[in-house]
Amino acid sequence: MTRYFTSLFVLIFGLGQVLAQPVMDKKRLAEFGKLTGQRVTDLQQYISLIADKNNSIEQREQAVELAVSLFEKDHLVNGKRRSPHVQVSRRNGTVSSVPVKIYFKNLMNVKFDKVEITSYDAAVVSEFEKGAGGDYRAIATYYQQFKGMDNKGNLIYGSRDRKDIRVTAQSAAVYAQAGKEDLKIFFGDITVRDTVPIPGF
Amino acid sequence: MISPKKINVQTILVAMIMLMISRFCTAQSFYAVLVADTKDPSLGASCEKDLEEMSGALRHISKKIEYNYQEIICIQDKFGKGGIQEAISKIQCKPEDIIFFYYTGHGINTNTQKSNFPVLYLKDENLELETIHRLLKEKKPRFCLTLGDCCNNILAGTRSMRTAQPVVRGIRVTEDTRIARKLFLESNGDLLISSARKGERAAAHPSEGSFYSNTWIQALAYAEGHNTHISWETMLADAENRLQASLKSLPDSLKHHSQWVSSFPETASPCAEASFMEINKFLNVLADEKLSFADRSKLSRLGQKGFFGPAAKVNIYMDDPDTPVETQPIEHFLKRIVNTAPLIDEFNFVERLSSLGSGCTYDIVTLQEIRKAR
């Protein structure tokens, strides 16, 4: 009898879990791909705003808040707290990795009088593919140009990075009032795929 | 003896003829007089595009309201005073019929001219838009709309051709007939519209058509797909907002503003201060990168208080309003718009999928955010 109820319980609640999974056809996933593209350009915009010392502190801090909100929340990995990391290419040619909040904080305090971070090509998002945990994954690539200048506007350091963002579309109650489960886009780690110095720097 | 087969064919034929006769006898008519300067060396291609788009839009409307569409086109040899007069004389109007007059081409005005509406610059003799409107009203239709998309400046001049970004196309066609019925069947009276005020020139895109005609058709299509409430006043105000948004990259001297006069009383809509037109206007001004961050932030705070409830949520969709891709709290959404204004081309608010809370503020907002082409 107990076994019978257990089976019934598993059947009812298990079925509920299956039904709650959003149905993602190609068209729907393409829409999420388009949304990811927009959020990547938002991130690029926030990075430009944060780095630009001509902007007010209020605007730069607001841009940090908005940029951080695009990323996954801190989570536990093997008992250790982990937040998404951003790889940064250094002037000496090395690459280091910092937690996302530290990355944006550092961007507020870059040691150049003037900083200009712009995108030099349109971001590209790969097709979403279903992961083992039932979520969907993609890679977004964006192209970032960094220019550090002195107070006269002379270029001191410049480089061009091609960076990859790990994107996860997790199941979430996106429009709860409609009683539907859908996906929510989160950014994970950012890695430097390659760095090309601007000639002469 | 008549074979059963013959009876069947005869019966079907008679039935079909009867059906057609009864249809033409009972159906009300939607007369569309479309006048376009398609031969003009500078404006011809643009006028041709306008003609095609307007004809398609009106055909679609008349089908929805189940009116018999009767189109009279005045182009080439018929593009003149004679052609227009002949077209008007062909209209055999019944009291329940609709007359729609549309002109796309050059226009002028003079200091001596009393009318604020333009004079149509025709191939034989010029004709005032207001005179045409009066002649059509004399036919006593249920609803008479006259629309002139042309310059309204003091001296005759070439209509400015601008390559600013054309308006967005591909609006979802809806089978819902409520909005078309509200606009074209519940408005008894007349409406006179011009794309430019006295002294202004109207802009056109070399291949995409006139800016005002485009935004007028766009506003009508969006209202059909996105609204439950509509009036001509809000629809024309939305078209005007869209016109200004599409002209924002042009110098101030080339900007123009639509104007209209109507004979019918405005129907009161619930929460007029939070109408779709007001929300669209607020969002599109908020995304105007010409405003400073401080001004956008100030406007955002005012708008948040005036239009949205404290816990309002914003559903953002890509292609289908019924399946949004993201939901954001209103405060986060507005902050994002203030900071990403240079990336945004346009917002389209979906009134039918948004809900008002208490005090005429929205608790749920559904909208489309169109990004600039990169």
Image (cartoon, rainbow, N blue to C red):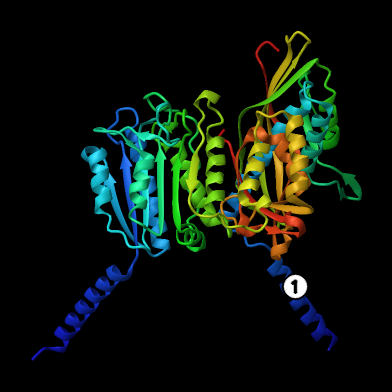
- Residue ID at (26%, 39%): B81
Neighbour class for label 1 at 10 Å: few (<14), some, many (≥20)?
A: few
The structure residue drawn at horizontal position 28% and vertical position 73%, both measured from the top left corner, is B22
x, y percent for residue B200: 47, 29
Relative to residue B111, is residue B68 depicted above or below? below
The vertical placement of B282 against B250, above or below, is below
Q: Identify the residue position indicated by label 1 in the image.
A: A14
Residue drawn at point x = 52 percent, y = 52 percent: B232
A24 vs B294: above or below: below
Is A23 situated above or below B129?
Answer: below
Question: Residue flagged by tag 1: what amino acid is it?
Answer: Gly
- Chain under label 1? A
Residue B372 spot, x, y in % from top left = 58, 36
Is residue A164 among the parts visible in the rendering? Answer: no
Residue B76 in sight in this render: yes
Q: In this image, B171 relative to A86: left or right?
A: left
At mark 1, the secondary structure is helix
Q: Quarter of the image holding residue B303?
A: top right
Judge by depth and name the residue closer to the eye, A141 or B145.
B145
**Which percent across, then down, holds residue B2?**
10, 89
Which image quadrant: the C terminus of chain B? Answer: top right
The quarter of the picture where the N terminus of chain B appears is bottom left
Q: Position of residue A76 (x, y in %)?
A: 88, 50
